[in-house]
Amino acid sequence: MRICQLLLSRGQGGLEKHVRELTIQLHADGHDVIVVADRSFLRDLPAGIERHAIPSHLSRFNPLLLFSVVNILRQINADIIHAQANKAATVLSKLHPWLAAKTVGTVHNIKRNLTPYKKLDHVITVSQQLSNGFKDNVSVVYNGIAEVSPQPRDLRQAFHLDADKPVLVAVGRLVEAKGFDMLLEAIRGLPLSLLIIGEGPERQTLEKRIQSLPSTTQCHLLGQREDATHLMASADAVVISSRREGFSYVFNEAVLCNSRVLATDVPVANEVLPSDLITPIADPKAFRTRLQNLLADLLGWSTLMQKPQRQAAETMTLRAMSSNTVNVYQSLITTHAKTY
């Protein structure tokens, strides 16, 4: 199958990571993959993947961008053109009538305006919640990550934590959306240790909150780390306190490394975990009470995680994501061809 990935964002965030990993896996599975994206993104792709640079710094409404993209898309003779995220979907929706290939768009985050996606042949969403904006022609494909073999660490020794306290790990950018302020309020005074992995503009504010915690509660901001998965696997539990998410890679990684998880009511944790492991968003009292109950019965917490861990192993790996995406492609190709 000849598959084009269309990406019009710039940067090196979660979206770019997703497209890169999907592209590499599709290529490894024997598909002919073409990537149309910003030159900075194309530089990191492996040899053997066809690539075409476009001026993605231009507005989605700029005629020069539209002309550049349509010329490339008409030349590459793809079976499928897959627009990743809103800007690419908007551009592809405008060009759709002049293209022979089947078109797909992936919604990665909550969007108010879904009209561009509805003009494409099919939509993929990365969570069930995001699919609610579409009546038909939609499939849910969870993001996947490469399977890892975590190396256990002694976190108490490595970070000078009290030996008799449970260790929790939280991961994410230090921004309001991740709810770390709520998390610190929820654990205030509890006899536990919390390690927060990540960096961001809220660091100074969070440091002040940490300094005000009573001595019974330990918390360290570890900054950005390459070994986050290993730390999650070594902790007593992973906590997710987000106020909003499109898809939580942290949840994905935590479940795949067999961690215990407690999360707020955000995707995809709220689609995989049992209700006993989900708390209301921005409710520190509810989070605190649930956490205390779970820490008092770690064996019971582990039992609650067994079904989510099996589901993640089946649907949230890189190979599963690629396979499920290809199934969507194949279903489109086998339907009747476009007429003009």
Image (tube, rainbow, N blue to C red):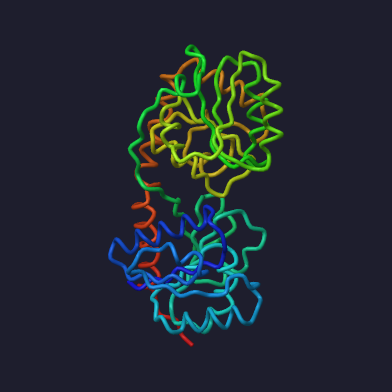
Seen from the viewer's position, the closer of residues 213 and 295 is 213
Q: Left of 290 or right of it: where is 259? A: left
Q: Residue at left 56%, top 59%?
A: 11
Residue 169 pos. (x, y %): 51, 29
Q: Residue at left 37%, top 48%?
A: 146
Q: Left of 272 or right of it: where is 199? A: right
Quarter occupied by the N terminus: bottom left
Residue 286 pos. (x, y %): 64, 25
**108, above or below 155, in the image:** below
In the rendered image, which quarter is residue 186 located in? top right
Q: Residue furthest top?
A: 164
**210, above or below 103, in the image:** above
Seen from the viewer's position, the closer of residues 306 and 35 is 35
Seen from the viewer's position, the closer of residues 163 and 19 is 163
In the rendered image, which quarter is residue 306 located in? top left
Q: Residue at left 67%, top 34%?
A: 282
Q: Residue furthest bottom?
A: 340
Q: Left of 32 or right of it: where is 202? A: right
Residue 256 pos. (x, y %): 39, 38
Residue 101 pos. (x, y %): 43, 78
Q: Residue at left 33%, top 37%?
A: 149
**317, above or below 297, in the image:** below
Q: Residue furthest left?
A: 30
**85, above or below 149, in the image:** below
